Image (cartoon, coloured by chain):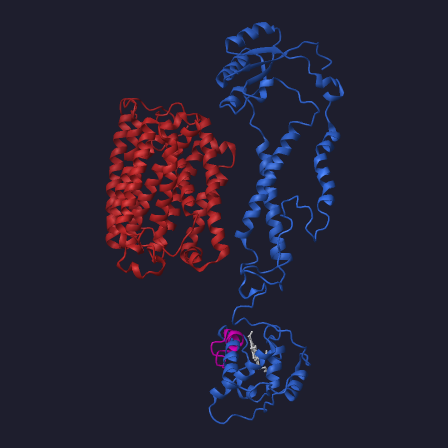
Chain colours: A blue, B red
Amino acid sequence: MATTELRNSRFRASFTDPEQLLRAVAYLRAAGHRVLDTYTPFPVHGMDEALDQRPSRLPRACLAFAALGLALAAGLQIWTSAVDYPLIMGGKPLLAIPAFIPVAFELTVLLAGLGVVASFFLVARMRPRWRVPDLHPGANDDRFILAAELATDVQFPAVARDLADLGALESSLLVEDRFQRGGSFWDRPAGVGALLLACLPAFLILLLVPVLNRDFQRRNLAWDGGMGAPLSAQAFDASGVLPGGKVLQAPPPDTLSRRGEPPLAYGPGKAEADRAGRELPNPYQPTQARFNRGKLVFERVCATCHGREGDNNGSVIVARGAFAPTVLVSPVVRDMPDGRLFHIATFGGPTKMKGYGDLLSREDRWNVVLYIRELQKAARPGPTASTPASTGAQP
Amino acid sequence: MSQTFTVPVRDLTKSGIPTLADIGERLRGGAWAFVLLGAGLLGLGLVLQAERGWGNLLLTTFNLACVGLGGLFLLAIQSITGARWSDPILKAHRAMPALLPRAGLLMLLLWFGAATLYPWARPDAATHEALHGRLGWLNPPFFFGRVALIFGAWIWTGRRLTQQGKGAAPFILVFGLTFSVANFDWLMSLEPVWSSTIFAIYGFSGMFLQGIAIVTISAIVLRRVGLLPAVSKAQNHDLGKLLFAFSCFWAYIFLSQFLLIWYANLPEETGPMRLLLQGRWMPLFYLNLILNFGLPFVLLLGRKAKTSEAVLLATCALLLAGRWLDLYLQIMPPVLHGLTPAFGLAELGGILLQLGLGHLSCWPVFMKDANPAQELPQGG
């Protein structure tokens, strides 16, 4: 700046029509002037070619940020829902790709958009200024404006005449760029101060939050129209709309659930199973209702492995050629006391079988034992083998 | 650079360079051969397996109608927005609606196949539980009355728009309503149990994409034979951007429909979806996504690609194949009752018929105001 002699060589011209602008650009370039840039209310077709501009490299930044967003979204979702905290939801697989797409899409678009704008500011070295230089008041309105630099040894008035012939509303030499020279405080780049100033409204709102919304348990000033404090129902509240007049609903019929039962006086293991067999009688008598319930539970839970008749027929384990579960209608199980069967249903078999104490209520486990006895009778008609008498005592 | 695929290689032994009239002559003969062969194959398909024959006739008809509507819709929005970028290629848009009358006639032919295609047209429709209470709307006389009405509206508003440049806004209104009805009626009622409330917009996204693809192909070919001399790289770039955007739009709508069905897992909605996701239809399901979104997305991502005629032509070909497959996957599973997908005489016949009819309808419009003796530009 200091080396060149002071010659005001830059000028502007404004037009009302994009075609005129295009023609003017072509004329100036042909006459050896350097067209710096054009400013138009909308993209003008053919302007890039007329200015002979290199295509922007911003799309690459856009692509990179988009890829970053996609990778972040996919990584976050896959890691949280399939690796770190695998939780089956809605019966979908852990790695449920369709469910990840919306978030992945949003994050891709978001990062691509923000990233490309940030890159643009960075590349164009656009930093906040107190006062924005204004090339021409119409630049923000409906004028088509160009800025150019005179070729050496050409005088401006001659160019201005030609531009007027091409339809220019006005054209004028630009004064020396004040911003380069420092000038007053307002002409300097704004720096961090402006940034903080721009954030002021946000700070103010943050300051107001404790005043506006003190107690999150209570409805305070409803500055948000009450959106922050929705009506919420607690499990044991009464309800005007739900069946039964209560919020808490009974589970659908045939749901098997754990009840709040006192702890069992037995632990897992062979010795405990034997002890249960010696000490625990079946507290219930066989009735039609218990038979039905026992059948339901058995067929839902036990039959997958033991077969519907307790004979391993139709057992998924046997069908797949793996180890076989014990045949429940065999003499071995027939001779086990009720308490032992109950213990097995609760804590599992000696080696492979899982216990079902966590899934089945105590009563259901006894019902299943009753049902197994019926299965055994059906498998070998005739007088039943000696089973311990049920006394009706509570376990 | 390269010789185009419609411009015949210059015959050095013949005196003179081929003119537009020469090509028109040659292409018309080919198109008639396509039409006759296609109709014959389709007829043979009908005799061999009635379901597939009628299904393919429906596919052909719908595809042709959608091409016509695609051109009209593009024309209408450009007229409403006062767009000027497309001025040099408007001829390519204007030709498409000429397909509508032919598609309408084909659609009326389906009267004879309605009972094969649509459960509501069968004698036992009254016992179909999903049709209970719907037979007042879905019955052959009313259905085909609507077909005639809808095509009438399209043809009439289309004429006004293409010939006088008037009525773009009314066309859009009429189009929105009738195209939704058409999708629900002609395609969705093939499977009365299944329903999707965004089915029409899904159909629209495919139709619009297809319209842009056809216009792009026509614009490029017409420029190469010298009928659209004003087309420049800028138009190619714009068309490329439109293709890219609406391929994404199609995928967006596809996912909007699929995601809800996948999540909610309602038996009546998942049933048909399961057929596509499992077993023999599965590869086609994924191929559909790849053709309509995956490949176009990758191919058109770069700026250079969007202006390259070769890339544009390849992408448009993929998209048109994808649209055909998309319709195939909407029509065939219910029509074939979930049997194995197949590509045979009937499918081939349908495609030949589309190509032939497409050319016969559009070429005369392309040639309007053109000098038939005009020589072809040499060297691509």
* Quarter where residue A323 is shown: bottom right
Q: Nearer the viewer, residue B234 or A161?
A: A161
Is residue A300 in the magenta section? yes
The residue located at (30%, 45%) in the rendering is B146
Q: Is residue A18 above or below residue B73?
A: above
- Image coords of residue A164 (percent x, y): 53, 9
Task: Give the tally of numbered discs.
Answer: 0
Q: Is residue A187 above or below residue B27?
A: above
Q: Nearer the viewer, residue B67 or B303?
A: B67
Does residue A207 show up?
Answer: yes
- Image coords of residue B123 (percent x, y): 26, 59
The answer to whether A99 appears left or right of A215 in the picture is: left
The answer to whether A338 appears left or right of A130 in the picture is: left
The answer to whether A98 appears left or right of B331 in the picture is: right
Does residue B358 show up?
Answer: no
- Image coords of residue A119 (percent x, y): 64, 33
Where's the N terminus of chain A, which quadrant?
A: top right
- Image coords of residue B118 (percent x, y): 31, 54
The residue located at (23%, 41%) in the rendering is B36
* Residue furthest to the front: A240
Q: Is residue A76 above or below residue B208?
A: below
Is residue A362 in the magenta section? no
Where's the C terminus of chain A, which quadrant?
A: bottom right
Q: Which residues make up the magenta segment?
A: A298-316
The residue located at (63%, 61%) in the rendering is A234
